[in-house]
Structure formats: structure tokens, C-alpha cells
Amino acid sequence: MLSDLGVCCIDEFDKMTIKDQVSIHEAMEQQTLTIAKAGINATLNSRASILAAANPVKGRYDRKKTLKQNVNLSLPIMSRFDLYFVLIDKADVENDRMISKCILRNHQKYNEADELQDDFSYFSVEDVIHFIKEIKTRTPIINETASQELNIAYNKLRQESLVNKNNYSVTIRHLESLIRLSEALAKIHNSPEVNSAHINEAVRLLKSSFVEVRKSDIILSSNQENNLNVTIKQREYESITNSLIYLVKSNELSKDEIILKYLELVEDTIENVQMIDVIKEKVNQVVEFLITNEGVLYEVENVLFVHPNFDL
């Protein structure tokens, strides 16, 4: 409410109570706040942009999990933000030196004006304030050409999200985000209309905020003497595992039989004889891994079964 027509900065956003989350959801969705207290009912404007910071659940961001799994925020709240930026504390000598120098300098008794002049030689604070005040009065127009380009960009993002649905999903709210970002970029460039450059940059910003889930390779076996590991890509491992579990549930098969059955399933993808040996060895390694490490399969009298506690 106090940030109406401005920017509201919120730290520790993930520590908000349920009551506060309900209130902030109304403010972000409807741009208003409803107050009912002491017999007074009022609706106040909250037309503000929100810049929020949150910490990961266990203190460190896990790249193998989605953004939603890393932060303690509900999906409706997260969907109200246009952009997400994940800041990961990586060890970097030069970057760490600059940060420590800045912190130490703040504790030293230097002339603040001189320091600002040294660090920001391009624009003064007054210039930036004047620029922001000026561009806030601008209202860029989305013409027919820009509207078509936004439609194409949104549909392309939508199709890409269907292919990578484990990483992120694109909804109609992302179209609204594209519109807001394109208009904001047009304002910054003091342009009366939204053009292709603004839309392309908006798409780049939106895509850069999609946090992809990093899936590490699966180590099927290791040889400590030669320091060699047999690895397989996560996606390929999941594909082989799903096929093997389907075959085991459908038939009573031994290890050799299930490998032959799997070869029959993928025979259309086999291009030469050499590939057969490669696939046989890979499937054999996956079967051993599922028995020894994962406990997904178990063997009784040379027949494979799926563990009853396993949920595909």
C-alpha cells in the first residue's frame, strides 16, 4: 500500500506466514488491498512492482531440484512473478576479492562522495533519478506487428516447455509477463512503440529466468584399480529402467531373457551389429544397478521381479 506506484522490496519472502501470503497474493493479483478492521471496510490501491528475495530450504540451492522444490513458496505466489534469478555462491577468487574489498571499504572512514564518484563515473545519482522519473511517464503502444510477434514468441515458448516439461512450464501468465517486460524495455529506450528488439530481449530475459534442473550422469559401476566409471545419462537411464520394469511386470524373465526382450523393443533404432553389443552391455549394467544399488529389482531362482515397494 505504501509502495503504490513504486517498488516494494521484501526480504526473507519465504518466511512469510500464511496470513501474509494471502494478503500479498491479493495485492499481486488485483493490485489492491482489502482492510476490514474496527468496523472499517476499505480497499486501497497497491499498484507496485515487487522485488523479493528468498533463501533455499536447506540453506544451499540444489541444482538437481526445481526452483519450486528449493524454496518454501506456494505455486500461486511464484506464478505472480515475471522473472526469477538464482544467485549461487560459487568460489571465485576475483569476485570474492571485490566483494570483501567493498565490505571492508564500507567500514573505513573514506569520503562517501569521492567513493561514489570513483565507482560510478558514467552517471550521477541525480541523473539516474531524473531518468527514472522521466520514463515512468511514458506509455508505449503495442501495435499490430508487435502483437503478432508477441503471439509467435509466446507460442514458441509454450512448445519448448512441452518438450522440457520437467524443467519448467509456460502458462498464459507468461504472455502477460512478456507484455510487461516488452513495455518496460520500450520505456527504458524511450520508444513510443514496442518493437522487435524489445520483444526479443523480453523473451531472452524470460528464458534466462527458467531454472533448468541439472541431472547428473548415473554411475552404473566403477573400477577402483583403473579409476574408471561406467556412466549413463539420466534420461537414457530412466528410459531403459521404465522399459525393463514394464517387461518384468509383464513376464517372468531371467537376466538374459530380459536383455533379449529389450533388444526386440528397440530393434527399430539399432543401425548395425556393433550397436547390439553396446546396448546389451548397457542394459546388463542397468539391471545389475537396479538390483544391487537401487533395490528396484530382485532375483529369485534366476527370475527377476519388481520390488513391491517400488512405485514407478
Image (cartoon, rainbow, N blue to C red):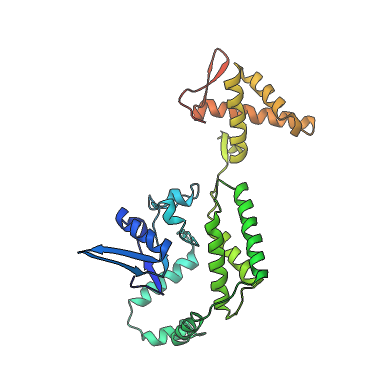
> Which residue shows up at 49% across the image and 81% down it?
137
Q: Is residue 230 visible?
A: no
Front-lying residue, 145 or 118: 145
Front-lying residue, 22 or 82: 22
Q: Against 116, is 63 above or below?
A: above
Number of numbered discs on residues: 0
Q: In the figure, residue 185 lies in which quadrant?
A: bottom right
Q: Against 264, is 164 above or below?
A: below
| Horizontal and vertical percent position of residue 106 | 35, 77
> Which residue shows up at 23% across the image and 63% down it?
37
> Which residue shows up at 61% across the image and 23% down it?
247
Q: Is residue 301 visible?
A: yes
Q: Against 188, is 277 above or below?
A: above
In the image, is 112 to the left or to the right of 120?
left
Q: In the figure, residue 216 lies in which quadrant?
A: top right
> Which residue shows up at 60% across the image and 40% down it?
235
| Horizontal and vertical percent position of residue 63 | 50, 50
Q: In the figure, residue 103 lies in which quadrant?
A: bottom left
User: What is the quadrant of the N terminus in the image?
Assistant: bottom left
| Horizontal and vertical percent position of residue 240 | 62, 32
